Every structure is written in structure tokens, then in C-alpha cells.
Image (spheres, grey):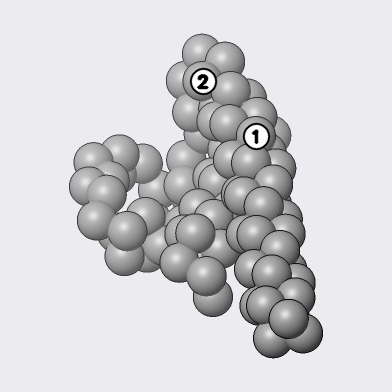
Amino acid sequence: MQAERQERDNSWEQQRQELERYRLCERKAKELVAHMEVLSQLDRPGRLSEANRRRLAACGARVEDRRALDSVMEKDVVTNFHVSQVLTLRRELLDTLAGR
């Protein structure tokens, strides 16, 4: 009887942890979408930093925009901030989904 109760309690705890993990994924996904929406509203994206170019390439993206970031303009800062946030949230979301 006590073993059954312990097993049921463990099952509930596992379900609670899994539900919390899904809630965390949902929050991260919503935040990621919000950053993507900001980027989609730009008439033209700013120029990417080398760090963001490398991170995108590491994800398998092909970055064809070769504009040099020789002088930084406001649109470049906005673009790089949101791209960086998207990449960070993507990694966190994948890790969370994998249970890491």
C-alpha cells in the first residue's frame, strides 16, 4: 500500500515537472516570437555583427548579406540585439525541450 502511494506521488511529481518544463518552453517561444515580430517590422534589417553571423552559420543559416559593419547605425544595433536574443532563446528552447 505504501509502495503504491510512493509510486503515485513520484508519478505526480514527474507530471508536475514535465508541465513546468512545457510552461517554460511556452514562455521562451512567446518571447522568441516577439523578437521575430520586431525584426519582421523593419523595412530593411540592419547589418549583422560578426558574432551574429557566426552564430547564425553555426545554426545552419546562410547569411548572404555582406554589408560591412564599418559604422554602427541605430538599425544595426536594433537588428543585432533582436537577432542575438532570437538565437539565445532558440538555444534555450532546444535545451529545455531536450530536458537539459
Q: Is residue 66 left or right of residue 33?
A: left
For the C terminus, give its image quadrant.
Answer: bottom right
Element carrying mark 2: helix
Element carrying mark 1: helix
Where 70 sits versus 75, above or below?
below
* Front of the two marks 1 and 2: 1
Q: Residue furthest bottom?
A: 3
Instruction: Tell me the number on the disc at residue 30.
Output: 1
Q: Residue at x 57, y 15 (%)?
A: 41
For the N terminus, give its image quadrant.
Answer: bottom right
Q: CA distance from mark 1 to mark 2?
A: 15 Å
Residue type at mark 1? Lys
Quadrant hosting residue 18 = bottom right
Q: Residue at x 55, y 46 (%)?
A: 86
* Count of residue discs: 2
Q: Residue at x 51, y 13 (%)?
A: 43
Q: Nearer the viewer, residue 34 or 23?
A: 23
Can you identify the residue that label 2 sits on?
Answer: 40
Position in image of residue 76 (x %, y %): 58, 39
Where 37 sits versus 13, above or below?
above
